[in-house]
Image (spheres, rainbow, N blue to C red):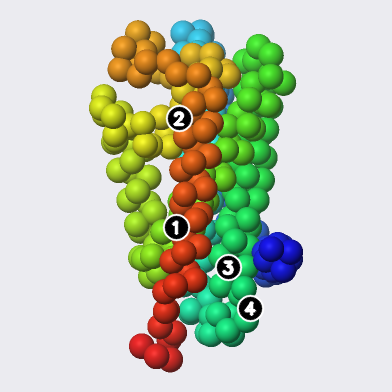
Amino acid sequence: MINLIRGTLATCQFEIDRSLTPQRLAVSALLTLFPGAMMLLLIRGPQMVNATLPEAVAAVHAFSTFAIVFLVSMVCVLTLLLWAPANIYSELEGKSWGFLASRPGGRLATYFGKFVTAFLVSFLVSVISLSICMAIVNHYLGIQEPARKWISLVGIYLIACAVYAAIFSMIGTIFIKRAMVVSAAYVLLSDLFLANVPAVVNKFTVSLHLRTLGISWLGWFLPDKREEFEGIYPPWPDAWHLSALAILGCTCLFVGAIVVTSRQYATTDQT
């Protein structure tokens, strides 16, 4: 176990050091600044076009929390899609998988190390983006209890990054070359479609649990009617949602670990 932890941390450090290139830093910077730029346009746009449109500014203020959550969530998922699904394929493409697989515990150390890297990078990008967005909104419109909302959202994105990183990492061990496409399709199918279906299947989606935790910690921020939402999704304790997310994330990590240790991956030279 100690060797696995050391190998995981060594892999994580190596991946972070390897990612410090101008190209990757530029992409991360663009993703980080995108939500803040969009919030600035949403707030300043009506004021620049016509300063006598208080109803437009009021509408932006009413849905500012939802806009922040939506934009930062989009950046969070995109960052995870860039890092987590290619965990095995990048090593196969770089012709280093044969060496890693032959080392004691090399497969698991690579798998868990890349999972930790994807989690840390996506969480860092999300927190910085969130902080920029909230600073902009608080400066122009004002936010009630900004510290409490910031801490609540940081907690939501901490959980989201961990669970999605586990899911995408598992997908990366199964589908290899098409892992990013499958991961994106999972997000579209599960979190945009199944999560809004009034049936038992929505209980197995990450989006529903995160959304419900967000409502519990932040108050109502969705553009939908609250009565309709509560009629379809009866309230559950926060512990229930946290347990469901923990079970889902651990299960995906466990399944991915089984696949990566039992499957024989064909290297580029063998195909």
The quarter of the picture where residue 35 lies is top right
**Does 150 sit left or right of 56 as displayed?**
right
Which of pointers 3 and 2 indicates the residue nearer the eye? 3
Q: Is residue 63 visible?
A: no
Q: Which residue is mark 3?
A: 108
Sequence-earlier tag: 3 or 2: 3
Percent across and percent down for residue 168 are: 46, 54
Alpha carbon of mark 1 to alpha carbon of mark 3: how far?
12 Å
Q: Secondary structure at mark 1?
A: helix
Other residues around mark 4 within 10 Å, as few (<14) / some (14–19) / many (≥20): few
Q: Which mark is residue 209?
A: 2
Q: Dots 1 and 3: beta carbons under 8 Å?
A: no
- Left or right: 266 with respect to 139? left
Would you name the residue on which mark 1 appears?
255
Q: Which residue is mark 4?
A: 104
Q: Earlier in the sequence, mark 1 or mark 3?
A: 3
Relative to residue 225, is residue 115 depicted above or below?
A: below
Residue 75 pos. (x, y %):
52, 44
Residue extending farthest front: 1
